Image (cartoon, rainbow, N blue to C red):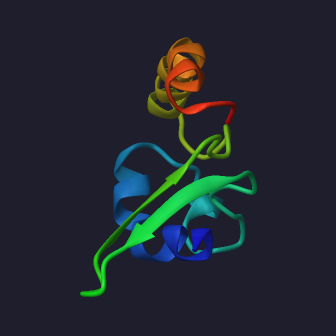
Amino acid sequence: DAYHVGWTHGAALQALGAKKDRIGNAHMFSESPGYQATTRFGHGLGSAFDPAAGLLSEVGKEMMEWQAQRRDLIEQRIGKL
């Protein structure tokens, strides 16, 4: 479902400093595995384990560093990503 990110969340991506070519779906948000859960009412949550590193500017780099620092702990809890 990563194809929708650039359209549905384009304004948020832009506010976080995404490169203008990331708005829309010219680039996929993530090409790696992830997790998605959807309720029978149509609401859901999607999480990519390794979102495209070039997606955001400095905010994105901080997020990727935060995620990398916690990866070992997460893998201990839920298994290898």
Q: Which residue sits at x=53%, y=32%?
A: 78
Which image quadrant for residue 11? bottom left
- Closest to the observer: 75 or 50? 75
Residue 69 at x, y percent in the picture: 54, 12
Q: Relative to 58, is 34 above or below?
A: below
Which image quadrant for residue 24? bottom right
Q: Which residue sits at x=53%, y=76%?
A: 4
Q: Residue furthest left?
A: 41
Q: For the N terminus, which image quadrant? A: bottom right
Q: Taking 31 as reference, is 2 left or right?
A: left
Which image quadrant for residue 40? bottom left
Q: Residue furthest bottom?
A: 41
Q: For the C terminus, which image quadrant? A: top right
Q: Relative to 7, is 57 above or below?
A: above
Q: Relative to 52, is 21 above or below?
A: below
- Closest to the observer: 31 or 36? 36
- Closest to the observer: 23 or 2? 2
Q: Which residue sits at x=48%, y=76%?
A: 7
Q: Taking 27 as reference, is 77 left or right?
A: left
The tally of labels here is: 0
- Closest to the observer: 64 or 49? 49
Residue 67 at x, y percent in the picture: 52, 24
Q: Relative to 54, is 31 above or below?
A: below
Residue 70 at x, y percent in the picture: 50, 17
Q: Which residue sits at x=52%, y=48%?
A: 18
